[in-house]
Each structure stands twice: as C-alpha cells, then as structure tokens.
Image (tube, coloured by chain):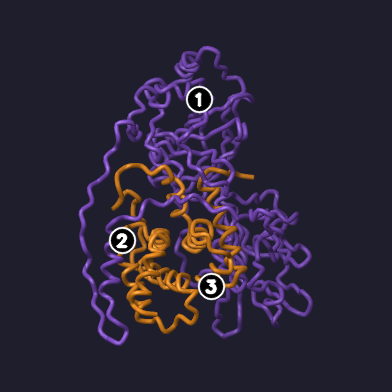
Chain colours: A purple, B orange
Amino acid sequence: MKRWNDPFPATPERFHLRVEATLGSLEERTMKERHIIKRTVILVAAALLTLTALAAVVGNTRLKDALNANGAGEVAELVTALHADGGSAEGFTLSLDEYFWEDDDLYMTCSVAVPPEGRYMVALYTPTLNGVALRYEARGWVSPKFYDQESPAVLLYGGEHPDHSTELLTFSVDPALRQRHDHQLRLRAVLLKCEAALPWLTDFGGLLDPPRYASLKAAGISLDALIEAGQAEIVAQRTIDAPLDTASEQTVYNDVAEHDFYIRDTRFHVDGFRLSHTGVELRLTVSGDGMEQWADGSTQLGFCTREGRELGLMLSAEDSSGRIALADGSPAYALSLNTHALIPLKDLEVVLLAPVTYPEDAQGRQLSPVYDLDRALVLTPVFNEALPAPAAPGVEEEGEKLC
Amino acid sequence: MTRTDFAARVLACERRLYRVARTLLRSDADCEDAVQEALLRAWARLDTLRVESYFETWLIRILINQCKGFYRAKREHVPLTEDIPAHAEPDSGVLDALHALPPKPRVALELHCVEGYSVAECARILGVPEGTVKWRLSQGRRLLKRELGEEGLT
C-alpha cells in the first residue's frame, strides 16, 4: 500500500516546546505527585502571502462582469463574445438530470460534458434559487467542495480525466425561501481550455486516481489570475434556468413484506425497517448464535442490490455486532446506512443485507466490495399504512429512534 | 524504562503525535493540550505497557482516547484557518476533506495511509478487530473520494 504524501501542516514550534516542557516536568516514577504545565503561549507571527502567491478568490471581477447575464438574449451574446479564437463550444453540455425535495433539502444531479479532445476546466458556479445562492449542506453534512459562495468550483476534464461526469449536489434551503410558491433554479458553468498540466493540484501519492476537482480558493488562486497568466482560456458558458416543482417527494418505505428469515438454524426477525432516497435503517432480533457465524470480526454487513451493487456507505454500523439492548434483555441488532449518494428507489425491488468483504489487489489497493449474496437477507420494502409514518431525516421524533 | 528513555521515544514520534491529534482536533491549541495530557497519562501508566516495542502504538492509543474526550467536549468544527499560518497549504483540500469524514474512518485513514501503520497495528491501536479496520478504511476512502469530487451518482 502506497502511503499518502503528508497533507498536514508542519509541526508548530509551539507544539514541540509544549512536548519538551511536558517531558521535562515528568517526575521519576517513584514520585507520586505530578506537575501540570501551564500552557505556554508563544506568539507566532502569521506567515504573509508571498508576492507570487495569488490572492484568495474574491474578485473574479473580469469573469463576473463577463458573466453577469440576466436574460437568454444577453447570455447568447455573451456565449458568442466569449468564444476564443479557435475555441469550440461544441461538445460542451450542462444538464439538470433530476431533482427532488426532501422537506427543505434539495437533491439534484447535473451532468457536464466537454469536447472530446483537449484538457479543460469547468467552473461550476454555486446554483441559485430565486436569485439566492444555495448553501451546500443537507442533513447536517457540509460539503467542502464549494468553500465560497462567490468562487466557482473547478472540475477537470479531458486528458487523464473523463470527458463527462454526473455530479450530485445537495443543498439545504432556507425555510422562508422554501415556502415560496415558485422555485426558479439557475445553474451556470463556464468551460475553460487549459492544455498545460496544473502544478497546483494536490499530489495524493497514487492512492487515489488523479484528482479531478480542485478548489481554487484552497490553492489561493483566482480564476482571473489563471486566465491572465495564460494558464486557462474561456471558451464558452452554459446557463440553465429551470422552474422546480415545490412539492416534497420523499418516498419512504416503513416495512418489509416478509419479517422472518432463516439461515441455517438461525432465525432473523425484522423488527423495524425504513428506506428512503437517502438511507436505510434496519433492526433485527436474532435467535441462536448465528450472527457471529454470519458476520464475524473479519466480515462486515452491508446493504446492496440484488446484483450485489452497494447502496451506499454504512456510516452508523460500527461492525457486524451493532447490538442494542432491548428492554427484555434479548439481543437485537441495529444497522443503518446513511448515504450521500441517492438510493435509486424506482429501480429497487429488494434490498439485501449480506456479509461483505473488501479485497485488495497486489499493490494493496482496495477493490470493489464483494457481497455474499447466497447468505443475504432479501428484504422487500413496502409501505404499511397501519404503522406510524416515519419522520423525515433530522427531525426529532418522540419515542425510540429506529436505529 | 527511564524518564530519559521515555522522553527520547516520545520525541522520536513527535511528528506522528501531532498528525494524529490534528486528525481529530482542528485547533493546534487543543492538540497541545491533548498531547500533554496523553504524555502525563502514559508516564503515569507505564506499567500497562507490556511490550516495549509497542510503545509508539500504545502511546498513540492513549492520545486518541484523550482527543476523543476533547472532541466530545467541544463538538464543534473549528475553522481550519484558526491557529495556523495564513498562507494556503497546497494540501489543505485533502486535509479539509479528511476532517469532513466521521471520526472513525478519519482516524483509520490517518493511521494507515499517513502514518503507514499496518492493518494489524491499526487494530491494536484502536482496539478493534482487523476486519473493522479494513471496513473503516474502505468507507473512509470512498467518503474521501466523494468529498474530493471523484464520484457522482452512479
């Protein structure tokens, strides 16, 4: 396994002095009393930006002015005006694929494609809803992709990167804005051509594929500066103005068709189940000691499709023994999947809970997870009107949470 | 182990201690406090170290427990720019993405991918089965890829 290059800042001098001071204060172990060192405050002069370092992104003034279009006519003119000599916008597409609301959280997927030849950057601006920039946060998860509402995120295409992608964007919308009767979304992307390799990209030491996303702000670089330095050239822009339906489309299944399963001599009973676009929760009681045979410390449990494709990342289940204690003392297992991809509910007839292993190749890189479908519990989601409607994610509900 | 030996071993892994603390705590001041308490606790409980060759992993485990206490007490995101120089680190995108992960996969990634501990060593440090370490690493890598824009909806 290849180690990462060290992404951490240098060890502060203050830290070293504290360690030394602490070590110097240690009494020989025959002494019982120990001294607590008060924190030594050392003023560290802040490092200044060098003259060659570019300012943090605030003033993409040239780009902002160029892109400050309010109507389709102006946009068309600007697209024409922005075409550089020899540059072609053919093959550059931006599309809004699908979206849905889950209370005040907006989930959308948008696709970007660039011309087949050459290296490109696509600057994806923070989408706006009724003119208000959206906040990249949903269900308490703040995405660091877009650090600043003003500066665009830059995605890299072509060369060693793919020439198209689908991005999942999640937002938390202010309730006051959400209550409006009309929702007008604007998506805007700018295509820039850059043939040279970009030296300011982080080197991940080969652990990850070449990164295709870069935060200009984190690198201390502005888009204008890149253009002025000749490292990038505006080719075209695309803007989408789309009215969104306002209804919340949360789909939730709160039960399963069959509650009892047998694997060898072990009985598994489903006590609770909940499935939505963004997560799965399951509670099981197990009769017998089959749980340890089913998934021990070297094997985990995961949710997947009938074909063995994982549904998302299991964040809440620490290992296979996510036991919770019931009031009568009998063992139960709580597992939950909390994912930031979207679970494709319309294509999902069943959800499988199966032992999963994570194989590695000869270089120590992890391969795709492998689910043991022969030993899976096959859960058929249903909505049971007799059961109380589950609360939306993030909403406090009375009584015991399912998982 | 004498105090001199203890000090020498601590200084030899000082950089590692900083990185581990920084993985869980975003404030340098908190890292200093956590490491100080960890060293004091380790010195006081040196008898619990059964095999001297495991000193470093044993110390890191104590440090992680100290950091968890700080993390639970504070439960807040400290902006990365606090207590560090003003210049932008080229790798701050990676560090930010790392800090966006839940603590368990975050620590597993730091120990394995930055510090270079084997899965078995990580399991010993964290006090969990090796399979759990592998799972946390896998989840952590996938989350990190998502945070860094590697994957969209599939």
Residue assigned mark 2? A16
Residue assigned mark 3? B124
User: Along the line of sight, which residue is nearer the eye, A59 or B37?
Assistant: B37
User: Along the line of sight, which residue is nearer the eye, B5 or A103?
Assistant: B5
- What chain does badge 1 belong to? A
| Residue A80 vertical position relative to residue A237 in the rendered view, above or below | above
Nearest to the eye among marks 2 and 3: give it. 2
Mark 1: secondary structure: strand
Mark 2 burial class by Cα count in 10 Å: few <14, some 14-19, many 20+: some
- What chain does badge 3 belong to? B
Q: Are marks 2 and 3 in contact (CB under 8 Å)?
A: no
Image coordinates for residue A301, horizontal then vertical, percent: 65, 66
Q: Residue at x 27, y 80 (%)?
A: A27
User: Along the line of sight, which residue is nearer the eye, A194 or B1?
Assistant: B1
Location of residue A317 by image quarter: bottom right
Q: Residue at x 23, y 51 (%)?
A: A44
- Looking at the rendered structure, the kind of residue marked 2 is His
Image coordinates for residue A295, horizontal then vertical, percent: 68, 72
- Looking at the rendered structure, the kind of residue marked 3 is Arg
Q: Is residue A247 visible?
A: no
Q: Are marks 2 and 3 on the same chain?
A: no
Q: Residue B5, labelled with which disc?
A: none
Residue assigned mark 1? A192
Location of residue A298 by image quarter: bottom right
- What chain does badge 2 belong to? A
Q: Are marks 2 and 1 on the same chain?
A: yes
Nearest to the eye among marks 2 and 1: give it. 2
Extreme residue toward the top, this view: A85
Image coordinates for residue A249, horizontal then vertical, percent: 56, 48
Q: Residue at x 44, y 54 (%)?
A: B99
* B9 on left or right of A384: left
Mark 2: secondary structure: helix
